Image (tube, rainbow, N blue to C red):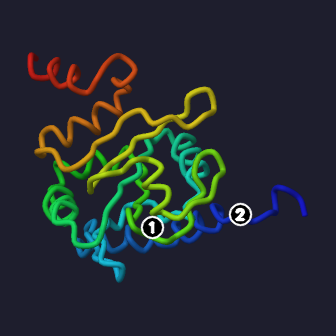
Amino acid sequence: MSDASRITRRTLLRGAASLTGTLAATTLATGAAQAATRLGDDGLYTQDWYVDSFLDLGEDLAAATAKKRHFALQWSQRGCIYCKELHTVYFADPALADPIRATFDIVHLDLFGAREVTVFDGTRLSEKAFGQRERIRATPTFQFFALDGGTAKEVARLPGLLPQKEFAAMFRYVAEGAYKDGTFDAFLARRNRT
């Protein structure tokens, strides 16, 4: 079978997404749909615009980079009141959510989950083991990644839920590549002076 005719998981998802996108565009044209928060059977809140991932993080990061988008992991846990606030208050505000949605691919992980994740170095771990390895201590936590010389590198981390203004600023910090020039605190200080 030639490479051109080979069907990959990502190609299959892209095809399904284009069908869904056509349906969503039709629905949006009638004004009947918006981005929505979902409460899953696992007890976790999530967004319908988060990446529907096979949990191969290297593949997800490469796909985001190819689309000139930024990549983040968002960690949650069942019963987390701050996770609920993130999804039902912060992301319910289009002024906050729309710029993030427009520029980031986000994969959602459960801090105590059992799904198998293929991490950037090819190691396969449960979500729980990966969270422990990454020293995730609070939820929600966002980890931001970029490719550096072909290798995945964590460029910023947002542990917990900051006030909305600072929360939005963290995503701008990453989107603007300001992590290359200094800390998030220095970025905020510069922003507050202007």
Horizontal side of 165 relative to 43 (left or right) equals left
For the image, the number of numbered tags is: 2
**How far apart are the alpha carbons under marks 2 and 1?**
19 Å
Instruction: Count residues near mark 2 (Cα–Cα under 10 Å), then give few for <14, some for 14-19, many for 20+.
Output: few
Q: In which quarter of the image is the N terminus?
A: bottom right
Q: Residue 49 carries which label?
A: none
Q: Which of marks 2 and 1 is nearer the N terminus?
A: 2
Residue type at numbered disc 2: Thr
Q: In this view, does 157 lie above or below 57?
A: above
Horizontal side of 27 relative to 186 (left or right) equals right
Horizontal side of 8 relative to 177 (left or right) equals right
Q: Give the residue at x 37% y 72%.
A: 26
Q: Give the residue at x 63% y 61%.
A: 10
| In front of the other: 48 or 71 | 71
Q: Is residue 4 above or below residue 188?
A: below
Residue 29 seen by the camera: no
Percent position (x, y) of residue 107? 43, 57
Q: Give the residue at x 47% y 72%.
A: 20
Residue type at numbered disc 1: Gly
Q: In which quarter of the image is the C terminus?
A: top left
Percent position (x, y) of residue 119? 57, 52
| In front of the other: 68 or 29 | 68
Horizontal side of 59 relative to 6 (left or right) equals left
| In front of the other: 29 or 70 | 70
Q: Which mark is residue 21?
A: 1
Percent position (x, y) of residue 86? 20, 58
Asked which secondary structure carries label 2, the reply is loop
| In front of the other: 59 or 78 | 78
| Residue behind mark 2 | 8
